[in-house]
Image (cartoon, grey):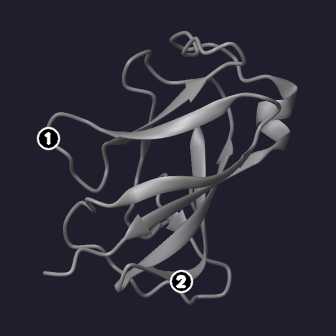
Amino acid sequence: MSVKLQYLGETEFNNNKGFVLQATFTGNYGVNGVGDLLNLTPSQNQGTDGGITDPKDAYNHFLQQPPTLYGVLNADIGGSYVCIHPNAVPTLKNFGLIMYEPGGAEKATNAAYTAAELAGSVQLFFAIPAQQ
């Protein structure tokens, strides 16, 4: 797994409840065009399964369906930037986090992360679907 997710807290946007996650990078980048896959389910194994970790045990928004409102709040990864991209049939375990290097080119398949990307983090927002 190349992205670790940690729950940071709740937020509200346009009368929708949501939550903020911090993503940090390890290993190598995923597949060009797909990115690193995000697992939006709670971790069952201290994050080694790619799920969301929560050291304060406050994460109580167990998504039952993929969110339709999401975004990147902040990226501190040395000039690189990311976008969230749902795959063709979105599930809670296949949203892609696509990374672009300074200059705008997507990172190559299985490319090593730079030191700045490994040391940095990205904050992501996900709204909880209203009909859930």
Can you say which quadrant of the picture contains the C terminus? bottom left
Single out the mark in the foreground, 2 or 1: 2
State the residue position of label 1: 89
Left or right, residue 46 beside residue 62: right
| Left or right: 82 in relation to 55 | left
Q: Is residue 29 above or below residue 59?
A: above
Which residue occupies 37% across, 25% down? 34
**129 to 2, vertically: above or below:** below
Which numbered disc flags the more N-terminal residue, 2 or 1? 2
Q: Amino acid at mark 2?
A: Glu
The number of discs equals 2
Res 48 visible: no
Q: Nearer the viewer, residue 115 or 47?
A: 115
| Residue type indicated by callout 1 | Val
Q: Is residue 43 left or right of residue 81?
A: left
Q: Is residue 23 left or right of residue 13?
A: right
Percent x, y for residue 20? 55, 70
Q: Nearer the viewer, residue 35 or 79?
A: 79
Quadrant in the picture for residue 73: bottom right
Q: Position of residue 23 (x, y in %)?
A: 62, 52
